[in-house]
Image (cartoon, rainbow, N blue to C red):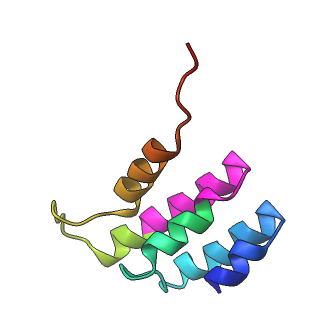
Amino acid sequence: MLRAAGDMRSDYERAEALLALANGRFVDAAIQPAFVEAATAIRSSHEQNRVLAALVRSEQREQPSHNPGATTAATYFTMTRARRRPTPVS
């Protein structure tokens, strides 16, 4: 399903496929990096935010107690975004 989502050209269709995974609780720690990578490929900030918010909500449902050592979707996304930022031109 993640491969299919990665091949979709429509941001809306990609977001809907990823939302189905997140809302169906199919995103575990093993596939989370691929899920976030597919989400970051969405060009529309609105659709990307919908998907990442659903992922964070699914994590909150799965982990009611806070585990400071766990890498959450929000943390992973922040780390991924930091690596992707272009270098400012002087």
Across and down, in percent, residue 57 comes to 44, 65
Q: Residue furthest top?
A: 90
* Residue 58: quarter of image: bottom left
Farthest residue to the front: give it: 90
Please give left or right for residue 64 compared with residue 85 in the image.
left
Quick one: 63 or 68, which is closer to the camera? Answer: 68
* Residue 4 pos. (x, y %): 72, 82
Along the line of sight, which residue is nearer the eye, 41 or 16?
41
In the image, which residues are magenta?
40-57
Q: Residue at x 16, y 60 (%)?
A: 68
Which residue is at 45% across, 53% downward?
Answer: 80
Left or right: 65 as drawn, with respect to 2 = left
- Taking the magenta stretch, the answer to whether it contains residue 16 is no
In the picture, the quarter occupied by the N terminus is bottom right
Query: Main SS of the magenta segment?
Result: helix
Residue 61 is situated, as x and y percent measured from the top left of the image, at 36, 74
Residue 54 belongs to magenta span: yes
Q: Residue at x 63, y 74 (%)?
A: 18
Q: In the image, 33: left or right of 16?
A: left
Q: Nearer the viewer, residue 13 or 58?
A: 13
Task: Say which residue appears at 58% left-offset and 81% top-offset.
Answer: 21
How far across and how far down the image is residue 67, in percent? Answer: 17, 66
Nearest the eye: 20 or 31: 31
Quadrant the C terminus occupies: top right
